[in-house]
Amino acid sequence: MKYVSAKVFAKDNNISVRWVQELCKSGRISGATRLGGNGTWMIPVGASITEKSGTSNSNISNSMEVINMVNAEKQMETGQMLLNKFDLDMAAVYFEFAGEEFVRRGDYQDAINAYDKTLYCFETDENLNRVEEIKSIIAGIKKKMEEK
């Protein structure tokens, strides 16, 4: 059987390496094995990401579920809002938390994606004060990325 690294799998699936590592750790990429216990994740060629089973208390996992939910909403062509104000506020909190965690871990692209979703929630809710704040945070993260 042929294997690829987490980096290659991430690129092929248009997701971050860190997210691939989390998926491997939680057993959601079948056949993924870790070399040397704490080493590199090796993933079988053609492996797929399985649906999450059960519940998790991981805030990042919950955030990604909310991000996926809002992505689906954002892609709807009708323009109808499915989320009420409470849902938008909760989604924004999740995204902001996820963004902070990604920055802390150095996963800047994931942080920008999370903050973009936060921005979307605040724009949809017409919370203009927070819109400017989040735009400033995103600009700061992009500056950090350029400095690397």
Image: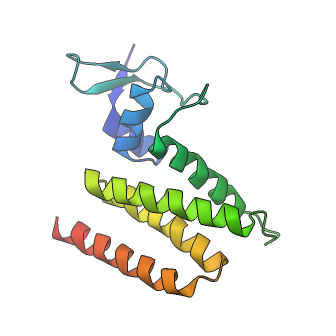
The residue sitting at 35% across, 53% down in the picture is 101
Residue at the left extreme of this rendering:
148
Measured as percent of width and height from the top left, residue 32 is found at 40, 21
Say which residue appears at 24% left-offset and 27% top-offset.
40
Q: Residue at x 38, y 74 (%)?
A: 138
Is residue 50 visible in the rendered image? The answer is yes
Nearer to us in this view, 111 or 35: 111
Q: Quadrant of the C terminus?
A: bottom left
Left or right, 97 with reference to 83: left
Quadrant in which the N terminus appears: top left
Up the image or down, 47 lies above or below 13; here it is: above
The image quarter in which residue 35 lies: top left
Which residue is outermost to the top?
1
Choose top left, top right, bottom left or bottom right for residue 25.
Answer: top left
Quadrant housing residue 142:
bottom left
Please determine whether, in this image, residue 16 is positioned above or below residue 145.
above
Q: How many marks?
A: 0
Query: x and y percent of residue 57 in the render?
Result: 50, 35
Q: Is residue 31 left or right of residue 51?
A: left
